[in-house]
Amino acid sequence: MKIDVLTLFPNMYDNFLSESIIKRAIESKKVTVNIHNIRDYTVYNNNQVDDYPYGGGNGMVLMCDPIFRAVDDLKTPDSYIIMMTPSGKVYKQKTAFDLSSKKHLIILCGHYEGFDERIKSIVDLEISIGDYILTGGELPSMVVLDSVIRLLDGVITSGSLETESFNDGLLDYPNYTKPFEYRGMKVPEVLLSGHHANIEKYRMEERIRITKENRPDLLGGEHE
């Protein structure tokens, strides 16, 4: 997979791309990630990429031309273009799975008061990572990058992916490791029993309990 990210703050990605699973995925050539500065595509000598909104209002709006120029430069027949925006569809694990099957992603990161509306005409999917506002699309884009890259073949073992939260509408079960007892808190005896059927039953019951307590909306209930 190839991923191109368009941003006004490319340095924000330096540590993100050079640590842990993302770093290993890049080094093993499971994915290629390129970070592009939107200002490199402006026609203005002062590197301007934004301007005041028509009709008045606070803040600045990213202009069409640098974004269109950048996408024209990067786009291929396999490209799938994503815009990070609070007005997009809320990001879900299913979306991550869908995106992991694409050959080429182009991710647009907004800032200030967002994008000129006409930029949406070249976008395939608008994504929001939740009902809150951040200063820009860089952190949300990293969420998408992380969640998609880890799903690529060979990045993480398939067994680990199969038991994760949200794969079947439930949150994950609790995990424990040594020591058996710590500050009066013990590991559930069933996990030491060696009885695999009982362990699986316990874990499923815990998944349902945790989901009911923390995310009843996943079971059809309400969630604040």
Image (tube, rainbow, N blue to C red):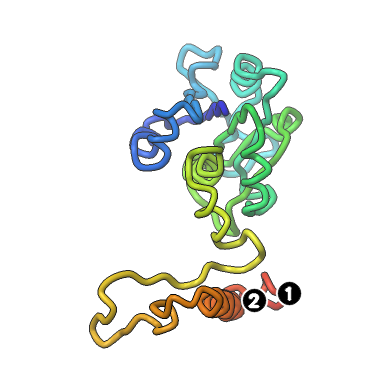
Instruction: State if disc 1 and disc 2 touch (CB < 8 Å).
Output: yes
Spatial CA distance of label 2 from label 1 is 6 Å
Q: Could you tell whether 50 is left or right of 124 in the image?
A: left
Residue type at the position of mark 1: Gly
Please give the residue where the numbered disc 1 appears in the rendered image. 220
Q: Is residue 112 visible?
A: no
131 to 52, vertically: above or below: below
Question: 214 or 161: nearer the eye?
Answer: 161
Residue at the spot x=71%, y=35% of the render?
Answer: 117
Disc 2 residue type?
Answer: Pro
Residue 148 in the image: x percent, y percent?
56, 42
What element does badge 1 sit on? loop
Locate residue 113, reporting x and y percent.
58, 41
Q: Quadrant of the N terminus?
A: top right
Q: Is residue 183 above or below residue 93?
A: below
Q: Residue furthest bottom?
A: 184
Relative height, residue 199 to residue 127 (above, below): below
Which disc number belongs to residue 216? 2
Q: Callout 2 environment at 10 Å: few (<14), some (14 to 19), or many (20+)?
A: some
Residue lying at 59% horizontally and 34% vertically, measured from the top left: 61
Which quadrant would residue 27 be assigned to in this image?
top left
Is 143 or 50 nearer to us in this picture?
143
